[in-house]
Image (cartoon, helix red, strand yellow):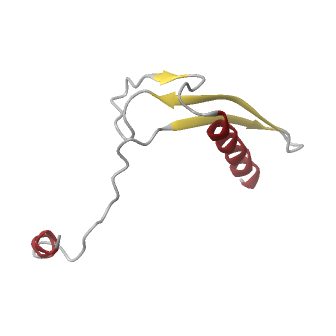
Amino acid sequence: LRDMAAKALSTSAQILVEKSMKGWKEVEYEVVRDSYDNCVTVCNMENFDPLGIHTGDSIVMAPSQTLSNEEYHMLRDTAVKVVRHL
């Protein structure tokens, strides 16, 4: 790692260190909120393609098929909180 950093710093003043997200899921929630702060999740979608790979012709499953009930509800609740915060 030190050798790689030294090589990178020889051509640039900064290094970008990233964490691999291999194996992670990419899930989206469609949430609608009205002027009275009522929210409804229309659906959730899960990308079939690996995280971060989008060709423009990505396959999406709706509703998602691989989330546990606990994961589904946690993500749904979080999506609603985010929309209400906007």
Q: How many marks?
A: 0
Asked whether, in this view, residue 3 is left or right of residue 60, the answer is left
Residue 42 is situated, as x and y percent measured from the top left of the image, at 71, 28
Asked whether, in this view, residue 68 is left or right of residue 6, the answer is right
Towards the viewer: 68 or 57: 68
Location of the N terminus by quadrant is: bottom left
Q: Is residue 41 above or below residue 84?
A: above
Q: Is residue 45 above or below residue 12?
A: above
Residue 52 image-quadrant placement: top left
Residue 34 image-quadrant placement: top right
Q: Is residue 29 above or below residue 78?
A: above
Asked whether, in this view, residue 56 is left or right of residue 65, the answer is left
Q: Which residue corresponds to the image point at 53% horizontal and 29% vertical from the top-left? A: 66
Q: Which residue corresponds to the image point at 67% horizontal and 44% vertical from the top-left? A: 74
Q: Which residue corresponds to the image point at 52% horizontal and 30% vertical from the top-left? A: 46
Q: Which residue corresponds to the image point at 25% horizontal and 70% vertical from the top-left? A: 15
Towards the viewer: 59 or 1: 1
Asked whether, in this view, residue 53 is left or right of residue 64, the answer is left
Residue 3 is situated, as x and y percent measured from the top left of the image, at 10, 73
Residue 12 is situated, as x and y percent measured from the top left of the image, at 17, 73
Residue 64 is situated, as x and y percent measured from the top left of the image, at 57, 26
Residue extending furthest right?
A: 36
